[in-house]
């Protein structure tokens, strides 16, 4: 075989035939790029960056791009390339980027199939208006279910004194079942608000099985004192008009810079019990607003029988968790959040479902499939849960309608929580049906409401995950920067401060895909769970019990902890992405851990709560971290660095332990050195002018030592430095972060 690097031909197909590593989808990518490039005039032909792996270089003025798949995978940014070439690269890779990646032809087939039947996408995604229980104007009731594996289906409940077989459904085509209940003689409905009901399935072994409807809107666990077991019960939610919550506020405008406060209603209570929707609306939402966040991400709303699952083992997908209140109270909570200018995101779990049978989706129709794959493909070994069958027409209807239900009925503004890792997207074991579903979901949501926000919980770095479906992407607006919290915990657990690599920190914070938005966060809710530690607890541990009083003796551990906590959060906020996320309580360094009530802790709620009293006590140092968090968000609100484009890192010095970068017209300087401070430290900037400190982690109101004078002005020098056209000289104290803004030209 000839050497592709030495083959001087203009016919790229000849190169294909000699370069043995190329696979069919790689050839197709390059064929598409070549066609687009050749369509440009020869004089204006764009040139892509030469491949760093030296697999193939342009010949003279030949405009062909690199043939290295790794470069395409990394989406190497063109040096000077027309937009149509960028688009074709995105489209080519998104459509054909890996053998197991979804072809958008398959996605288009699903869209065509849905649009040609069942009233199109609009009606298809409102399955909740067809399935489940529906009261008619004449007070008759229609019940419908999808149970393809059932032999017979019945409805039982209070209304028929629990006679399981007295009210059979009529079998329709495609596994659908329907039951009509005429009104009573007095004109009232046979089934009343808060009546208990069950779906009864007769399987093909003639066994009768009791189930909850997959479309149930209100399910409740019996109180322990009732001695009725632990399985949830379905209650009809059909309140009179006077008891239904009416929205009073419109949704706020979609934020340009997304500052997310991740929260859990149940653990938001300071008391050792489950918090309520009303308490959250009245007590917690104002806190979030004051802290400068403009979005809340609410966890564990979709009903889940196991409280300690953090909401990730969903049992009833259309029911709001009754632990915290009823559906009308949740609607009020969202409306109150909107009145404070907060976007509200629902943490959605569509990657798997609880294995519960009697109060979950599992084996609903008496078979092991129905909503899920049968066999090993339908089992999630890590979570001990079931995996959906995304190629089943009615499963797609169920899941897509579920997204629309929470949007239309409750007025949620978006959905984070979709998950995946590298092996799920590349290789022979990829479930490409999942990718098709994600593309369908994003297409549907953004068509329905362009202001919706979707966030992928992804660790793979998959190309085009956050590019529009129209470009061949999956269509998410953001992806979580999941490597960032892992890096901080790794540094805190395994290295002392003086061993931290500034280059490693910068690489982790900036290593994200071009033109794909990332949500940066310093620590996740997982790290707050029992068995792990928050950043504050890693930094200060037991000292938090004895030296967090402003009146206590000075503690080097607490001083270090407060300083690094602020620095870690600010550099993550400013350098790590295009959005920022914080988990409830971490903004003020909430001590200890989260531990939900379970057998192992005697069902205690002691650690399943948030101790707001700590931050509200003016005699405790938690207030310092809380105030810095607020000031950090307010600075972002003022200068808008999250939506201003990526930062330019001009300096990362391993000896000095200093990182400096520019973003949104600001200059950020971080000194991670354990004891060395620097006077007259040069910091490069491309913007000439006079600078002044606008945020310092060393400010006394943040628990600092007041080593930065905010009144000092720093005039730039036009002599180039650190690859920038100007520099300023600043004082950089150890373990301090300072943000400088240009106050004049």
Image (cartoon, helix red, strand yellow):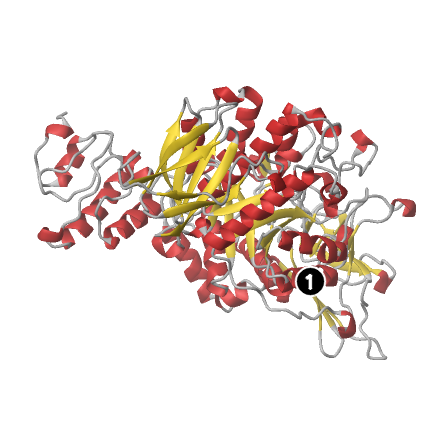
Residue named by callout 1: 331
| Position in image of residue 243 (x %, y %) | 78, 70
Disc 1: CA contacts within 10 A as few (<14), some (14-19) or many (>=20): many
- Position of 371 with respect to 162 (left or right) is left
State which quarter of the image contains the N terminus.
Answer: top left
Q: Position of residue 674 (x, y in %)?
A: 52, 23
- Identify the residue at image location x=78%, y=68%: 239
Query: Relative to 540, is 582 above or below?
Result: below
Between residues 586 and 181, which one lies in front from this camera angle? 586
Q: Do we see residue 25 in this rendering?
A: yes
Q: Image point 76% across, 36% down: which residue?
A: 607
| Residue 393 higher or lower than 408, as above or below | above
Task: Tell which of 131 and 420 is nearer to you.
Answer: 420
Side of 183 where 338 appears, left or right: left
Q: Quick one: SS at disc 1?
A: helix
Q: Nearer the viewer, residue 367 or 106?
A: 106
């Amino acid at each position: 075989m000839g050497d592709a690097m030495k083959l001087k031909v203009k016919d790229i197909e000849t190169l294909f035939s000699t370069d043995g590593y190329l696979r069919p989808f790689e050839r197709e990518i390059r064929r598409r790029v070549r066609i687009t490039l050749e369509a440009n005039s020869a004089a204006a032909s764009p040139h892509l960056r030469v491949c760093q792996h030296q697999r193939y270089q342009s010949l003279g003025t030949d405009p062909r791009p690199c043939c290295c798949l790794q470069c395409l995978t990394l989406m190497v940014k063109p040096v000077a390339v027309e937009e149509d070439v960028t688009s074709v690269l995105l489209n080519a890779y998104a459509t054909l980027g890996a053998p197991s990646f979804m072809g958008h032809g398959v996605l288009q087939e699903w869209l065509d199939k849905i649009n040609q039947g069942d009233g199109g996408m609009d009606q298809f995604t409102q399955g909740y208006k067809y399935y489940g229980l529906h009261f008619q104007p004449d007070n008759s009731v229609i019940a419908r279910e999808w149970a393809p594996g059932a032999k017979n289906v019945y409805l039982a409940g209070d209304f028929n004194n629990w006679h399981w077989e007295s009210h059979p459904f009529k079998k329709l085509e495609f596994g659908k079942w329907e039951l009509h209940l005429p009104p009573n003689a007095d004109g009232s409905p046979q089934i009343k608000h808060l009546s208990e009901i069950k779906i009864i399935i007769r399987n093909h072994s003639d066994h009768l099985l009791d189930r909850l409807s997959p479309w149930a809107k209100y399910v409740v666990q019996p109180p322990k004192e009732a001695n009725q077991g632990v399985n949830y019960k379905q209650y009809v939610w059909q309140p009179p008009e006077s008891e239904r919550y009416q929205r009073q506020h419109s949704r706020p405008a979609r934020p340009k810079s997304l500052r997310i406060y991740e929260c859990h209603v149940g653990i938001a209570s300071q008391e050792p019990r489950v918090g309520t929707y009303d308490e959250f609306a009245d007590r917690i939402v104002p806190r979030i607003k004051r802290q400068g966040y403009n979005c809340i991400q609410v966890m564990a709303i979709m009903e889940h029988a196991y409280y300690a699952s953090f909401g990730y083992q969903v049992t009833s997908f259309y029911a709001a968790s009754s632990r915290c209140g009823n559906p009308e109270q949740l609607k009020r909570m969202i409306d109150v959040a909107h009145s404070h200018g907060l976007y509200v995101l629902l943490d959605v779990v569509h990657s798997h479902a609880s294995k519960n049978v009697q109060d979950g989706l599992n084996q609903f129709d008496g078979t092991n499939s129905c909503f899920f794959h049968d066999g090993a493909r339908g089992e999630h070994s890590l979570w001990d849960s079931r995996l959906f069958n995304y190629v089943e027409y009615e499963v797609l209807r169920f899941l897509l309608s579920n997204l629309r239900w929470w949007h239309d009925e409750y007025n949620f503004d978006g959905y984070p929580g979709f998950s995946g890792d590298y092996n799920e997207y590349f290789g022979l074991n990829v479930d490409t049906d999942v990718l098709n579903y994600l593309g369908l979901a994003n297409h549907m949501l953004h068509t329905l409401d362009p202001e919706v926000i979707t966030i992928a919980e992804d660790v793979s770095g998959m190309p085009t995950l956050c590019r529009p479906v129209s470009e061949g992407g999956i269509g998410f607006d953001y992806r979580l920067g999941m490597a960032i919290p892992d890096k901080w915990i790794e540094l805190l657990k395994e290295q002392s401060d003086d061993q931290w690599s500034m280059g490693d920190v910068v690489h982790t914070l900036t290593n994200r895909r071009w033109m794909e938005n990332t949500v940066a966060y310093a620590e996740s809710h997982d790290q707050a769970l029992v068995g792990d530690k928050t950043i504050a607890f890693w930094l200060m541990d037991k000292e938090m019990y004895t030296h967090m009083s402003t009146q206590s003796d000075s503690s080097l551990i607490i001083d270090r902890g407060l300083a690094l906590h602020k620095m870690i959060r600010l550099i993550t906020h400013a350098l790590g992405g295009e959005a920022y996320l914080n988990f409830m309580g971490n903004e003020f360094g909430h001590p200890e851990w989260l531990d939900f009530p379970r057998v192992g802790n005697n069902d205690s709620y002691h650690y399943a709560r948030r101790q707001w009293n700590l931050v509200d006590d003016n005699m405790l140092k938690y207030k310092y971290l809380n105030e810095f968090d607020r000031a950090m968000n307010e600075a972002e609100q003022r200068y808008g660095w999250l939506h201003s484009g990526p930062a330019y890192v001009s300096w990362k010095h391993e000896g000095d332990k200093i990182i400096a970068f520019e973003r949104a017209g600001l200059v950020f300087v971080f000194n991670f050195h354990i004891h060395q401070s620097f006077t007259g430290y040069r910091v490069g900037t491309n913007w000439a002018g006079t600078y002044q400190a606008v945020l310092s982690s060393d400010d006394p109101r943040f628990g600092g030592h007041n080593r930065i004078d905010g009144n000092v002005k720093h005039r730039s020098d036009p002599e180039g430095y650190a690859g920038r056209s100007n520099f300023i000289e600043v004082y950089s104290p150890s373990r301090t972060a300072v943000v400088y803004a240009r106050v004049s030209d």
